């Protein structure tokens, strides 16, 4: 058709002898290519079925809703998600599946600094107990209302415990206290340190009906939630955590007790929770695609 339009003729460049040689050659099927293509398609289908499809587009998608926060009130919250024009899972899901993401492969200074700053701030936090005993949450003094709640901060509060015979300087912690935890117990030589960011997660309590400790008898309204891909942790409600598509830790009481980068990266846990080491993402990511057209 092109030849007719341009008034030109097409001349075959392969003569009959070469053509016979090509026809006499053995036919080799590309089974390896078939297998690789099948694996790529299978992983893409499983990823879409498991994590769903992100909003399609080139910009950012915003979702606004009224969500219960850790202070016991509903607030309008906005969730911003990067759109995916490849018709596939969002970026957080792809990272969880094994995409190449450097903070999961080596220690990223920016992510490490964010975690360190959060831990330094949490060291000076305490349990904020509402006066009507309707709830309590771990927070800073600035975020605890002085008229509606009491900031149970050691050593300025009469409920303080001792450490090595001296008054503890850090704490309190909502629903956690070395005096009532049985496992792991706080006793010499394994006494819990004064620094609350180094406290373990208590798995068994000896509370009874009432302990007369305000930070223990209250109803806790916020626990650690890992949000985003930078290892950000917030003490918040489960509703807010689910809305932000984070990882809620019901078993912990402090952000220092969880490792958010482990949640973000998924796959095999780090050998050292503080140092990412998933170097195998270099070849694992070869089997992933951003969406259906890529596969």
Image (tube, rainbow, N blue to C red):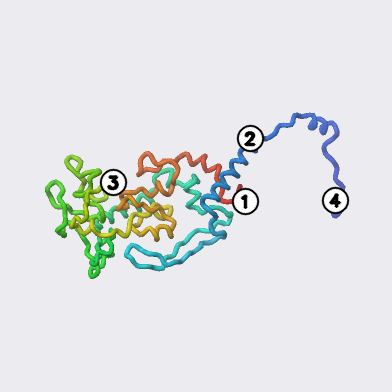
Measured along the vertical axis of the image, is residue 167 above or below residue 106?
below
Residue 168 as seen in the image, left or right of residue 91? left
Q: Could you tell which of marks 1 and 4 lies nearer the N-terminus?
A: 4
Give the Cα separation between the discs numbered 4 and 2. Answer: 39 Å
Q: Which residue is mark 3?
A: 203
Q: Nearer the viewer, mark 3 or mark 2?
A: 3
- Badge 3 vs badge 2, beta-carbon distance below 8 Å: no
Residue 165 as seen in the image, left or right of residue 97? left
Q: Could you tell which of marks 2 and 1 lies nearer the N-terminus?
A: 2
Q: Nearer the viewer, mark 1 or mark 3?
A: 3
Give the Cα separation between the discs numbered 1 and 4. Answer: 34 Å
Q: Could you tell which of marks 3 and 2 lies nearer the N-terminus?
A: 2
* Res. 32 mark: 2
Mark 1, Cα crowd under 10 Å, few <14 / some 14-19 / many 20+, is few
- From the viewer's side, name the closer residue of 208 and 97: 208
Q: Position of residue 268 (x, y in %)?
A: 43, 41
Give the Cα separation between the discs numbered 2 and 1. Answer: 21 Å
Q: Which residue is mark 4?
A: 3
Look at 20% across and 56% down and name the residue there: 210
Look at 40% across and 65% down and name the residue there: 67
Task: Please tell me whether mark 2 sits on a helix, a strand or a loop.
Answer: helix
């Amino acid at each position: 058709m092109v030849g007719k339009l341009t008034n030109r003729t097409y001349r075959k460049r392969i003569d009959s002898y070469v053509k016979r040689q090509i026809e006499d050659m053995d036919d080799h099927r590309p089974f390896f290519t078939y297998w690789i293509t099948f694996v790529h398609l299978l992983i893409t289908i499983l990823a879409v079925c498991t994590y769903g499809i992100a909003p399609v587009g080139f910009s950012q998608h915003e979702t606004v809703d009224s969500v219960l926060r850790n202070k016991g009130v509903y607030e309008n919250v906005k969730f911003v998600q990067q759109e995916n024009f490849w018709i596939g899972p969002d970026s957080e899901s792809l990272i969880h599946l094994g995409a190449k993401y450097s903070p999961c492969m080596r220690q990223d200074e920016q992510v490490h600094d964010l975690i360190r700053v959060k831990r330094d701030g949490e060291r000076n936090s305490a349990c904020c107990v509402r006066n009507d005993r309707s709830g309590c949450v771990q927070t800073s003094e600035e975020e605890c209302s002085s008229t509606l709640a009491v900031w149970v901060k050691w050593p300025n509060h009469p409920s303080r415990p001792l450490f090595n015979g001296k008054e503890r300087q850090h704490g309190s912690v909502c629903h956690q206290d070395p005096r009532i935890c049985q496992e792991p117990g706080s006793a010499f030589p394994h006494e819990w340190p004064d620094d609350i960011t180094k406290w373990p997660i208590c798995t068994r309590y000896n509370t009874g009906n009432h302990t007369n400790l305000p930070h223990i008898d209250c109803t806790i309204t916020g626990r650690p939630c890992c949000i985003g891909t930078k290892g950000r942790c917030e003490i918040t409600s489960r509703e807010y955590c689910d809305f932000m598509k984070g990882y809620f830790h019901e078993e912990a009481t402090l952000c220092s007790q969880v490792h958010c980068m482990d949640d973000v990266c998924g796959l095999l846990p780090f050998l050292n929770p503080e140092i990412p080491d998933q170097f195998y993402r270099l070849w694992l990511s070869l089997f992933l695609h951003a969406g259906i057209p890529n596969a």
